[in-house]
Image (tube, helix red, strand yellow):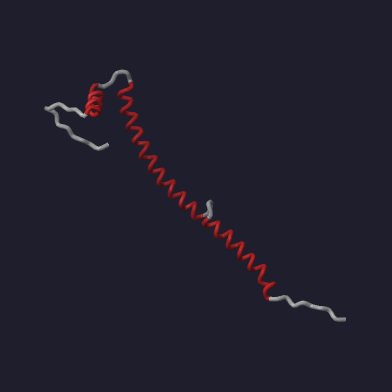
Amino acid sequence: MWTKQKRKSIRGRLILPALAAGFLYYFGFHAYHGEYGLYSRVKLEEQVKIMEAQLGDLTGKRAALEREVSLVRDGSIEKDMLDEQARRALNLSRPDEVTIMLSH
């Protein structure tokens, strides 16, 4: 009795490993470069550090502005603060005064 035996080709033996390698490459690439990958996490951590520094600067500026507002808000405006704000708004000074311009 004769039976036909088909010999497995080399292509058939390489299909499964090639598919597995393709899947591993695809998922490995996206695990590193994807939206939630390792590289994106490093970039996000850098952005967090930059934004925390900006937050510290803005918090300091806000505290300074709140101090200035509290001097004007109480109902009893300090004369020096009123004078300073009026001169700054009107760009005026007396002839006997020395004006020092500071950039804010």
Residue 50 lies, in percent from the top left, at: 40, 46
Q: Quadrant of the N terminus?
A: bottom right
Left or right: where 61 falls relative to 19: left
How many numbered badges does the structure rendering display? 0
Residue 99 in which image quadrant: top left
Report the front residue among 92 and 18.
92
Residue drawn where x is 33% and y is 20% of the image: 74
From the top left corner, tell me how far across and down residue 54 is, in percent: 38, 42
For the residue pair 2 and 65, the one nearer the viewer reads as 2
Q: Is residue 46 left or right of residue 63?
A: right
Location of residue 10 with respect to 101 vertically, above or below: below
Q: Residue furthest bottom?
A: 1
Question: Relative to the observer, which residue lies in front, 51 or 91?
Answer: 91
| Outermost left residue | 96
Q: Residue at x 33, y 31 (%)?
A: 65
- Residue projecting furthest to the right: 1
Q: Quadrant of the C terminus?
A: top left
Task: Look at 14% across and 29% down and name the residue there.
Answer: 97
Q: Residue furthest top?
A: 75
Residue lying at 41% horizontally and 43% vertically, measured from the top left: 52
Q: Position of residue 79 (x, y in %)?
A: 24, 21
Q: Quadrant of residue 76?
A: top left
Residue 7 versus residue 79 in the image, above or below: below
Residue 72, horizontal then vertical, whole percent: 30, 23
